[in-house]
Image: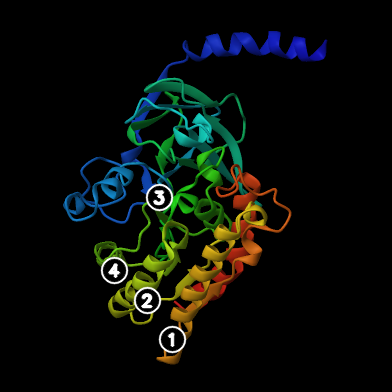
Amino acid sequence: MRFLMVLTLAAPLFAQDAEVAVRWKDVRELRVEGQGWRETRHPFDRLPARAEGVVRKPVWDLAQQTAGVSVRFVTDAATIRARWSLRKEALALPHMPATGVSGLDLYVRLPGGWHWVANGRPEKIANEQTLLRNWPGGKREYMLYLPLYNGAASVEIGVPQEAALEPGPARPAGARPVVFYGSSILQGGCASRPGMAYPSIIGRKLDWPTINLGFSGNGKSEPEMAQLLSELDASVFVYDSLPNLSAQEASERVEPFLRTLRKAHPKMPLVLVENPIYADVLFSEQRRTLIAEKNRTLRAAYEKLRKDGDKNLFYVRAEGLYGADGEATVDGTHPTDAGFLRMAEAITPVLKQALKKR
């Protein structure tokens, strides 16, 4: 009975939302993070416009998905609305919900750190929803994550007319972003919502800006990508590309890719992440041996670079990424939210060490 009463009382609030006078602001007037280049074809692309025709078409297309792009803003509004339009009509994937593929994710900074508030649930190409309603929390900093596997054509924040709405504070001097490069796992497949991709979890844990350059099925460590990523002024670079490589590709590409980054940034810390041990390797000797072979290749490159005098290399082994209970994935390969939390917990301590060396 109490549950029914709550629904009855809550229903009129939705009707009232449309009656409240709302002031809308394009998020580009606030503080957008998660993009490495300013000269993009579309507002929230992850690669520069000049990369079209340089990178493979699948990579270019995936760069228009907004994984890791976020907006920080400050408001004293008790009610916060969002409206966003998407680049693709397909809102979900067979193994990933629409809230992760095409939704928004709102967090607020509290004294203990970032805390989840609400997600924007996509229903069509153009969406408008209330994310926070009548919360007397006072003036706070918020962070809004954009979709992981869809592109955002436009995003606006709406607050009552009398409320303040301004960009979030600038990051401390020297807090250059941590740049992550890799596969669909890194991009956020199959998180239930954008804030649960592991680079975003780590960003909140460390309170540090991040750039997510995961390219689903196409984090192939090509030379042209190494050259592009070398342009970025990062605090740390995280290499997590093995899941998209064959054994031969790993043998041919990993070391040259890392050496290109090192040549451009002689002292920047590099964190190398092994291929996770997938939940279904118990039932596929082929997958088990492939993962083991690729991880040996990465370790060999790491040891060779260290032997050559590179003292700013850090390494994350596979064993701690997913755990051993088989409960960390949707399909054996791609993490659930629990899997992403495990990855973040395994990688964060190594990143903390790396950030001390920047």
Q: Quadrant of residue 164?
A: top left
Q: Are marks 1 and 3 in contact (CB under 8 Å)?
A: no
Count the labels in the image: 4
User: Which numbered tag is attached to residue 304?
Assistant: 1
CA separation in Å, label 1 and label 3: 27 Å
User: Which numbered tag is attached to residue 230?
Assistant: 4
Q: Which of the two labelled residues, at mark 4 and mark 1, occupies the earlier sequence position? A: 4
Residue at 60%, 24% (x, y): give it. 134
Q: Are marks 2 and 4 in contact (CB under 8 Å)?
A: no
Determine crowd level at label 2: few under 14, some 14-19, many 20+ residues with C-alpha closer than 10 A.
Answer: some
Residue at 61%, 35% (x, y): give it. 137
Q: Which of the two labelled residues, at mark 2 and mark 1, occupies the earlier sequence position? A: 2
CA separation in Å, label 2 and label 1: 9 Å
Height in image: 27 above or below 114?
Answer: above
Q: Which of the two labelled residues, at mark 3 and mark 4, occupies the earlier sequence position? A: 3
Question: Residue 78 in the image: x percent, y percent?
Answer: 56, 28
Q: Which of the two labelled residues, at mark 3 and mark 2, occupies the earlier sequence position? A: 3
Q: Which residue reaches farthest front? A: 285
Mark in the foreground, 2 or 4: 2
Height in image: 222 above or below 35?
Answer: below
Mark in the foreground, 4 or 1: 1
Secondary structure category for the residue under label 4 = loop
Mark in the foreground, 3 or 4: 3
Residue at 54%, 53% (x, y): give it. 198
Q: Amino acid at mark 2?
A: Glu
Q: Which of the two labelled residues, at mark 1 and mark 3, occupies the earlier sequence position? A: 3
Question: Residue 108 in the image: x percent, y percent?
Answer: 56, 42
Q: Which of the two labelled residues, at mark 2 and mark 4, occupies the earlier sequence position? A: 4
Q: In the rendered image, which quarter contains the N terminus?
A: top right
